[in-house]
Image (cartoon, grey):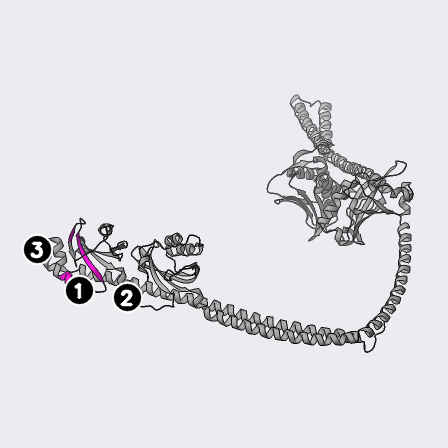
Amino acid sequence: MKKMKNNPLKKNNNLVKRSVFIILLSILLSAVLALIIYSNYNRFKDDLIRNEQDRLLNIADTIARSIESYISNQQSILMILERDLDVRAFLEESSDQKSLAVSDKMQMFLSTQKNGFEGIQLYRTSSALIGTYLEPYKKNANDNIEDVKEAFRTNLQTASEVYFDEGKNPYFYLNQPIWNEEKVIGNIRARISINKIYQNFIQPIKFEKKGYASVKTSSSVFIMHPKADQLGQDVLKIRKEKYPNYDWSDLEEMFDKQMNGERGTGVYKSVWVTDEKPKLTLKFNGYSPAYFGNDFWIVTVSSDYYEATKYIRTNLYTTIIVMSIIALSCSLSALYIVFMMMKQKKLNEVGVLLARVQDLNSELENDIEQRIILENNLRESRRKFIKLFNTGTQLTFVVNASSIKEGGLEILEVNDYACERLGYTRDELFQMKLSDILENMTDQLITGIEKNRTEKMMTENRQICIETNFTTSRNDVFPVELYVHEFIMEESLFLMFVGRDITEKKQKDKLIEKNRGIMIYKSRLAAMGEMIASIAHQWRQPLSRLNLIIGNIEDAYNYDELEEVYFKEQISKTQTIVQEMSAIIDEFLYFFNPNSERDHFFLIKTVKTSIDMLKDRLNIYEIETIIEADNDIEILGYHSQFSQVLLNLLNNSIDALKLCKGHRKIEIRVIETECNLVIEILDNGGGIADENMIHLFTPYFSTKNKGEGTGIGLYISKLIIERNFGGMLSLMNYEDGLKAIISLDREGTV
């Protein structure tokens, strides 16, 4: 389609896009600005909250340290009083004169402690009270002297629990043991008013409108509070009783931390008991423990969350209102612009529609032409595909993959060769399922495809191969190798089966197996021929000796010198020689025992027996044999076959060494690993040429001169090791000779 000049529709579209862009831009800018303001608000609020919490924690730490310092100072003052000689003398020996002197001294001491001790008691080591100073001395009915007894038990400064007098004023005692040389003779018990501690260290601190500081015991009972009616109360208990419908979980969690002696801050829901009408609100809190002795008090400083954040919240609301007005103004301006552009658009609408109709007609004509071309191309492609599909010489099927688990495979397409080979028409095959003409097809296929999907083989254009049988219309069965490939067409999954007739291959395999048995038999005959030659060679010497003995007996008889002793001696020698020859026969009979059952035999013993059978050849060519093994290993397998392998390898080494000059040797090494048993046979006979190395295990291939080798020894040896022992046999050039490596799996063999 050709582009139209001065297209009014395009102009109107551009106007609409610009107006929408202006509206979106104004909204986006407002949103970004609002986001920045809100982000700054949150950051500023977080900083303010963090600073407020740090401030409260610092105040709590300061109060706690001040209380600790105050109590420590009072303990130091008691230590000074403990050293007074009059007090010690009065405790050791009471008299009116000494009592009066101590009383005057105590009255004078207490007059200097306006912000310190309220009263003092003196106790003997029996916990008996012998003096009370600064009357009237009010005490609570629950007041006891357990702290005095504790001081006598530990001989250390102790502090009592907190008591409340009749006026609900809290107080506690400090105890100072009195020593005379290295012996405790009494105890000073001083009463301290907690209200004075509150007035000196907490009340002067200025807070916001609702903020205050308070002190609790380690069991969470108020002992310092701006409201006197809260003193002596369990903080959490009175909150829950007075406001049972509130959620106090945050406060409980913070109280657990406080009662464990922790310091920190928290934001939690609670009420301001200082308000006339308390209601649930958010609070900041900083808390710190004040330790003295084995106990501690909890100093808490609280402030109102909404008071602290009131300033930034007010500014946020103002900013939001201003931003809303700006965003509304921008949107109204953009809408006015859009309205004006839409009005202009309507004026050009008729011309735009006519131009658009012409453009659509042109596009439709082009689409029709393209569709005709595509249909022609599609028909040509299908014709080529059908021709190519039917010219194949393999049985080819296309089936619906979704029917794989429905008891069969629906055949959608089949080539001419498959119809001809199976004896069915194409229409007959379309009415059948693939499982009707294949053996165990569905189970094998499902297993194969699911396995290969797991291994991502099918999705990588790789195939699975199944060996099965086809059944023809005449009920003839022939074997095939069936290759299966998945593909997707028009969003549906299909399977392509390509079957290769392997009838001839099976026949060839049977023939190869038959020939393999013949070759093994020939190899055994060759080995037996070599052994018979060896037997003949080994019998030659004893036969010569027998001949000599018979000649000696004959001569002695002819010359009338055959005596009984001499005759018996010669007969004994003859029997010894016959036994040696019989042993040689027995040895070879055992070696070539054709027993097909697996039995246990010892490796090193078998190696030595093989060497003994070849000792004449080894001696003739002056070949040294070396066996390296830690111990003899018992093997489960076919003993005679393993011996045949050793003889083949040793004979090959001897044939190579007989052509060499210098020192000749054959080394046999036995190496044990965790998984394998390795037997290495090494010689220094010069090795094998690289071009011959790849053919060494090929049947009838030999590097020896014509008539000296059959070419099947190594082939049979490899066959025996791999098939009958489940191992591996390999050859490689090594230094100045050849190395034969037999590797056996320890499991099931050793």
Name the residue beneath numbered marker 3. 96
Question: Which portion, as a residue range, is magenta?
Answer: 105-130
Name the residue beneath numbered marker 1. 111
Q: Secondary structure at mark 1?
A: helix
Q: Secondary structure at mark 3?
A: helix
User: In the shown orientation, is residue 106 left or right of residue 223?
Assistant: left
- Tell me the mark number nearer the camera, choosing from 3 and 2: 2
Count the marks: 3
Q: Hey, what amino acid is under mark 1?
A: Ser
Q: Residue at x 81, y 54 (%)?
A: 490
Give the Cα separation between the discs numbered 1 and 2: 18 Å
Pick the front one: 346 or 544: 346
Give the mark nearest the N terminus, 1 or 2.
1
In percent of width and height, residue 6 lies at 81, 78
Give the mark nearest the N terminus, 3 or 1.
3
User: In the shown orientation, is residue 242 left or right of residue 125?
Assistant: right
Residue 396 visible, this angle? no
Q: Hey, what amino acid is under mark 3?
A: Asp
Pick the front one: 553 or 118: 118
